[in-house]
Image (cartoon, rainbow, N blue to C red):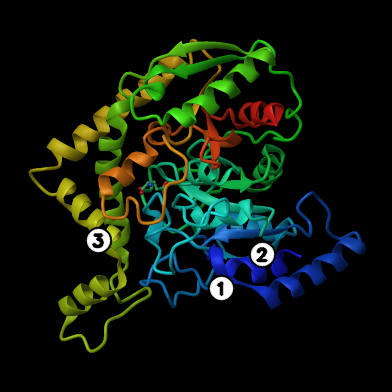
Amino acid sequence: AYLDRIERLDGELNSFITVLRAQAQQQAQVIDQKIRQGELQGPLAGIPYALKDLFCTEGILTTCGSKMLANFVSPYDAHVTSQLKAAGGVLLGKNNMDEFAMGSSNENSAYGVVRNPWNTDCVPGGSSGGGAAAIAARLAPMVLGTDTGGSIRQPGSFCGVTGIKPTYGRISRYGMIAFASSLDQCGPMAVSAEDCAITLNVIAGFDERDSTSAQATVPDYTTTLNDSIHGLRIGLPKEFFAAGLDSQVATVIERAVKEFEQLGAVVKEVSLPNAHLAVPVYYVVAPAEASSNLSRFDGVRFGHRCEDPQDLTDLYKRSRWEGFGEEVKRRIMVGTYALSAGYYDAYYLKAQQVRRLIKQDFVDAFKEVDVIMGPSAPTTAFKIGEKADDPVAMYLADIYTIPTSLAGLPGMTFPIGFAADGLPVGMQLIGNYFQEARMLNIAHQYQ
Ligand code: GLN
């Protein structure tokens, strides 16, 4: 049924780069047999899903949304790919995305723009925009995305779906093509918090192949979904409700906050005084790490190689020039500049120091409240092309999600209704470290 929907609807939406029709059907049959013979059980057995096209999948194309990897067939599975395989999931295909996960609109993909199913003139958000659109159009019941500065939460909000970026280190990054390694974290997107919880049960946990993988024990995320939220202390950061927040979005957010009060939560204002520095800090730290991570794409070991190189330097230069898109090149230049001798202290080191202050704001806020709530994005989905020529305007689409990422805290988005323009609005929930179970519980209670 999902494959048929993809065939019928994805011509217009373009949310998949690769659809594995024959392979998925075959896999489903094998799994069905195993379930019948009692060899396979569990909530994901036989459940179809899709992966953002930066998770390595053995024998299957993994493009990362880039021309650079247009011919890259991974020789191994990412940690999460093998976990979902072992649980009996059926891989439908690989989702479209902004090139190397850099973007907030999915317009930076070498495989074309993705359209928002709620209004096909609008972007789905990014960089996990293909996955978010696929969930919204019911082309898959669950997908995995990644979030470096908001790439699960912002497209989740634009497409009216639920998504969670767990605490940094909660899920192994092994086999996930790196963008900014101190920020990258993968997570599920689905139609409900419950489906995210079921998925998290399978993919969370320690993995020795990722040196930043957390040792913390993994709870069963489904058992606390129905806990009462009576007495829950919700903090609303005043900086998230200031200038820059679209008034239509604010109205929907305020209405949902009132509903949480009716469910017994206690709401109070908190302050994140350094939050306004998060976007500038992120655009030093993330490009710096990206410039280093992307140096491996040199035309020798992976992906695109130019024709008839004159010498090694020409090979590097032209392969990278031809393989990378405009935004990726911009980030490599910014990052290389920030890391270069003489500028390192002024930019990279300074950014890391301010990052620490941003984290401290959250530590202080969590002394007063249990969770933080606010908008996932300042607006609803914008029009395709609207911000395409203005990188800074595009960067501001993540103004509310980036602080969480810099602090390594878990963040999620869940749909709370529609703005006056008819487009979905997502509520962002920020929890303390490793509080994913509580966050899923809170979102579940709202739904
Ligand atoms: N939009 C942000 C960026 O372009 C965040 C992307 C992400 O989380 N992968 O870097």
Determine whether the residue tagged by mark 1 lies in a helix, strand or loop. loop
How far apart, in angstroms, are the residues tagged by discs 3 and 2?
32 Å
Task: Inspect the image, locate mark 1, and give the three-letter code of the amino acid beneath it.
Answer: Ile
Rendered location of residue 238, percent (x, y): 40, 17
Say whether residue 332 is left or right of residue 250: left
Circles 2 and 1: CB distance less than 8 Å?
Answer: yes
Binning the other alpha carbons within 10 Å of mark 1 as few (below 14), some (14 to 19) or many (20 upward) gives some
Towards the viewer: 215 or 333: 333
**Pointer 3 and pointer 2: residues touching (CB < 8 Å)?**
no
Q: Is residue 432 visible?
A: no
Q: Which disc is residue 91 wearing?
A: 2
Q: Residue at 60%, 57% (x, y): give it.
A: 134
Residue behind mark 1: 60
Tally the marks: 3
Earlier along the polypeptide chain: callout 1 or callout 3?
Answer: 1
Kindly tell me whether residue 235 is visible in this rendering.
yes
Q: What residue do we see at 39% from left, 61% from top? A: 99
Disc 3 residue lies near ligand 1 with CB under 8 A: no
Question: In this rendering, is residue 403 above or below 138?
Answer: above
Question: Residue 26 appears at what percent x and percent y?
Answer: 76, 75
Q: Residue at x 90, y 59 (%)?
A: 38
How many neighbours does mark 3 have within 10 angstroms: few (below 14), some (14-19), or many (20 or more)? Answer: some
Q: What mark, if any, has residue 329 been given in the picture? A: 3
| Callout 3 amino acid | Lys
Label 2: state its secondary structure: strand
61 to the left or right of 311: right
Q: Quadrant of the N terminus?
A: bottom right
